Image: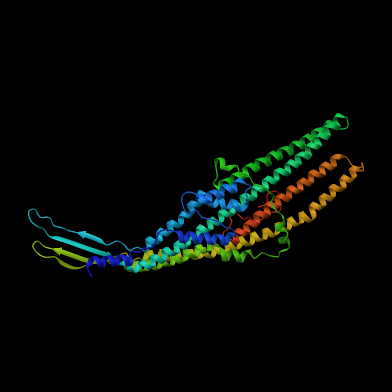
Amino acid sequence: MSLRSLWLASAALFGGCTSTDPAAERDAVQNDLRARLQTEVWLPASTDLEPELAAACREWLADDLTETEAVRIAFANHRGLRATCERLGIARAEFVQAGLLRNPVLDADPAVVVGRQGEIEFGLVQPLVDLFVRPLRTRLAAQQLERTAAEVTRELVHVAFAVRRAFVHLRAAQQLVELERRRQATADAGLELMLVLHQAGNATDQQVAEERVRAGRVRLDLATAEQAAREAREPLQAWLGLWGEATGWTVRGELPIEPFAALAEAPQLEVESTAVDRSLELRAQRAQLHALAEQARLADVQGFLRTLDLGMAAQRDPGESWQFGPKFTVELPLFDRGQARAALAGAELRAALHQYAQLAIEVRAAARLAEQRLLHTARRLAYWRDHQLPARAESLFRTEQLYHAMQRGAFPVLQERLQQLDDYRTLLDELRTAHLAQLDCDELRAGSRPSTELRPYWPTDRRDPP
């Protein structure tokens, strides 16, 4: 075999021909997401939005937007999510690069002599250390690719649940506006009645002033609720990646209370075991542990064998034929024997082990807290629906009976109606909290920890629970 054929064969064998296209990783992440989110999602595969997906997004935005459609639009249109997906391409390129051998080095040393032919010397060497460390580098890069895939999947899962939380906030804010409008209508009716009585001489100026204050406060509550509904659109707008004319979408419907009926009687939900088993953070950390183990092995190998180049040398003196012979260079580990790099790799591996154990503890604690909060909120909802609201309705009914019997005036009836609407507002607060708690549990089951701080509940924090 000629020298050129030998080098070409070596390049074909060790140079690597692995594709840098991360299509396989993207498909694996997409399939994993479908299983975790229990819905069909599409990851962008190019810079621009695909025509078919763009048409589907326009169709979803033309009608009342649903929660599932909002998640799909975010996956298709959010630029930050597209940047996250590009990390798969970066990790894939690094994996391919790790499997490539270093290029051979050609050096020439011609002696130039004026007026006559000079001495010529060539050398061609190949770093042979790559042959020993290439498998370690490849396994290290493979674990880093696995870690990146887990981290990307976790971020995409988090995006899906961030969209769902923003959807819950918007629906709750819109429901609150409707409640405040009903409160304002009741308060305005009371003020109008008081003015009629005052004009007839049956009400004092003080009573009119008190009714004006009450109606003014209700009107301010309505203005505050309308502003909250306007602001609740913008976080969802950002997740959807929409601007300009595309921001005219609408959301209809109320937060359902029926899904929490069965939870009020459930002893436990087994969130902890599922969260630990499917945690993408733990999966990424395990891949990091394997990568650090490979890094420690690589540090051991490179400690006593840093540089070993082997090749061929060619030399021709003036008037003589070419002479060939071997050529090699080796680094002597006299001062730097890699002991510091090995110690560093070992310390990083031990630190990662401690971090993995602590992360597992934190995931378990978050799962237990989220489960307890969901069950507690479901029981509170059941109490409000089955006891508090029926009791308030009974109180209003009895007050209306007394009014029709001319034993009570109209204002106690109006006050009772306002208190009933206040109870409905409290129920809405509880329902909003329940939906957010349900999303926390669902996100943990899907393999991601909620980014919001799960701080302990304090009983006096009733209007805006954690």
Q: Quick check: 165 left or right of 100?
A: right
**Residue shown at 71% from the left, 61% from the top:** 263
Q: Quick check: 124 left or right of 221?
A: left
Percent of width and height locating residue 224: 68, 40
Foreground residue, 299 or 100?
100
Q: In this view, does 49 lie above or below 198?
A: below
Percent of width and height locating residue 10: 29, 67
Q: Quick check: 397 left or right of 158?
A: right
Percent of width and height locating residue 443: 60, 58
**Residue shown at 11% from the left, 65% from the top:** 321
**Residue shown at 81% from the left, 37% from the top:** 190
Foreground residue, 218 or 81?
81
Q: In this view, does 344 lie above or below 54?
A: below
Foreground residue, 9 or 310?
9
Question: What is the number of callouts on the image?
Answer: 0
Could you tell me which quadrant the N terminus lies in? Answer: bottom left
In the current view of this chain or complex, which residue is farthest to the left?
115
Q: Is residue 172 above or below residue 442?
A: above
Percent of width and height locating residue 380: 73, 56
Does the image show residue 127?
Answer: no
**Residue shown at 63% from the left, 51% from the top:** 66
Q: Quick check: 419 left or right of 222?
A: right
